[in-house]
Image (spheres, coloured by chain):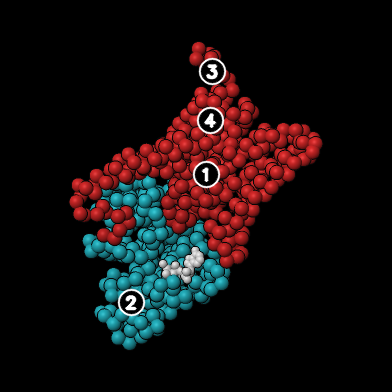
Amino acid sequence: MIQRRSREGSTEPLALEVEGLTVTYGKEPALWNADVRLGRGSLAAVVGPNGAGKSTLLKAALGVVPRVSGRVRVLGEDPARRRRLVAYVPQRTSVDWDFPTTVLDVVMMGTYGRLGWFRRPGREERAMALGALEQMELADLADRQISELSGGQQQRVFLARALVQDAEVYFMDEPFAGVDAVTEQSVASLMGHLAQRGKTILSVHHDLATVPRYFEHAVLLNRVVQAVGTVKEVFHRGNLDRLYGGRVPADVPELAST
Amino acid sequence: MSAPWVELDPTLVVVAAGTTAVGTVSGALGCFAYLRRQGLVGDVVSHSALLGVVGAFVLAHALTGSASRSLAVLVPGALIAGTASLALARSVSNRTRLNDDASLGVMLSIFFGGGLFLLRWVQRQSPPIPGHTGLEDYIFGMAAAMTRADLWMVFSLGGGALLLLLLLWKELKVFTFDPDFSRSLGLPSYRLDLLMMALLVAGVVIGIQTVGVILMIALLVTPAAAARQWTSRLSTMVLLAASFGAAAGAGGALLSASEAGLPTGPVVVLLATAIFALSLLLAPRRGLIARARARRTLGSTPPPAAGGAA
Ligand SMILES: Nc1ncnc2c1ncn2[C@@H]1O[C@H](COP(=O)(O)OP(=O)(O)O)[C@@H](O)[C@H]1O
Ligand SMILES: [Mg+2]
């Protein structure tokens, strides 16, 4: 469908197009007049202080928070019409890991969108989930109760669930938060593989030091979008000072100078 | 017809079937309330239902002249009052600085207080409204008053609730575990939330005749909490909780029939609590004894905390 579109016209739809987006929960806007454009195959980090609206930007792109004004397009369409082409990795701490369920069960939730109402996952869905677990090196934990996982394993379970969604665009909320070195490597290489295959990734990232290593693009956000572009263009000391109000940790390496 | 059933008191059969059904349904539905930490919501619904029950009685008397204590009249009243108190609590917490729990507490006081007030008013009417004695049983429950028609009400409402649970199993599961993710799949979270509330309300109103509005919450949450100790699968947990609820319901009916003066509702709840206490002690992995043992074999190393960073 997307290929056909790109042959017809010269303009291939962007993976994500956010224009003049404002979102509020209470009185204060969590996002103000945000503009973000991401081409397909982008590997982008969303960076900004706590409460900057990073998770909100992802949720707006998923079409799950009501927007006050503005426009969101995913692959050229309203997010509500692109659900099957989008995968979501919520913040790991947003769920109760003491919920009574197994690793395989959580990963199979990635098939629920395709299954639709009422249909139960069957053998095929199980096989897909096992494949994704294999890819995240969790195959031997398939029947494990999720409360018995380490933080890194929890994160890889969420990523396996996103893999099962077999999407074009991946929205990830802090997939590197609180994980061990092994998981950090596997998350980074997974992102790299997906991007190589033309998938688009927009990932909230909290560790400034590793932005240049893992990402090609960056969205600098603090309620308003301060800059969007390649890491080389926008991820420099001047922008970051502005973003964090001059409180950037001094030891951030690999920063391009202004 | 087999021999033992002929000898059983037909009233007892109705009562035992009713309490068993009530226990089964509230055990199953209670699991979702438990996992969504909505125990307080269930408590508000059941306390508020008293106003609905007495109100429906008064209204039926005013409209038809003959008041009825049948569930067919009282359940709609309980449904309306329970739903109204939840809706009001939600709008209060949306519009004021009161948080959710405080708003729920306020509605519980208003509706339960209102229910007690109206009940006292009904009891003071002269000439007395026929059939009003027994209304006060809704406070602590009176399973023995259950008729065949009431049983039919319990079966149909409870059966309907369980059927919905079964049909929407995977949707309710993912919505309960990970609401953000389920929204990203396009599941209508507002409607699923309402549906869960409706199921909870249904579970409460069919049980209040048996155990009363004050103890009803125990019958919802206790079997779920007990079942959680034994299993780490949602389906097993729901089945177990339903069985625990059924056992407590049946046991309560039989015990109170064999020993004169034992009130059915409180006995049902005490049995459920006993099952919970045993589960808390004995369950493998989660039980207190198993954990104490694990701690001893591990020596000084503390057990791994759930959700800890790697
Ligand atoms: N569901 C919500 N209800 C009310 N306020 C919220 C909600 N979610 C986020 N907020 C507020 O919106 C702002 C942005 O939140 P968020 O997008 O989570 O920030 P970040 O992910 O950058 O830390 C914060 O001030 C937060 O408190
Ligand atoms: Mg966030």
Q: Nearer the viewer, mark 2 or mark 1?
A: 1
Q: Are marks 1 and 4 on the same chain?
A: yes
Marks 4 and 2, Cα distance to the nearest angstrom?
A: 75 Å
Amino acid at pointer 2: Val
Q: Are marks 4 and 2 on the same chain?
A: no
Marks 1 and 3, Cα distance to the nearest angstrom?
A: 31 Å
Disc assigned to residue B217: 1
Q: Nearer the viewer, mark 2 or mark 3?
A: 3
Marks 1 and 4, Cα distance to the nearest angstrom?
A: 20 Å
Q: Nearer the viewer, mark 1 or mark 4?
A: 4
Question: Where does residue B90 sit, x and y in percent of width and height?
Answer: 59, 57
- Earlier in the chain: of badge 1 and badge 4, it is 1
- State whether residue B74 is above or below residue A194: above
What chain is tagged by disc 3? B
Residue in the image at 52% along x and 54% along y: B189
Name the side, left or right, on which A250 lies relative to A172.
Answer: left
Question: Where does residue B160 sit, x and y in percent of width and height?
Answer: 56, 36
- Earlier in the chain: of badge 1 and badge 3, it is 3
SS assignment at label 3: loop
Residue underneath mark 3: B8
Amino acid at pointer 4: Leu
Q: Are marks 2 and 3 on the same chain?
A: no
Amino acid at pointer 1: Ile
Q: Nearer the viewer, mark 4 or mark 3?
A: 4
Disc assigned to residue A231: 2
What chain is tagged by disc 2? A
Disc assigned to residue B262: 4
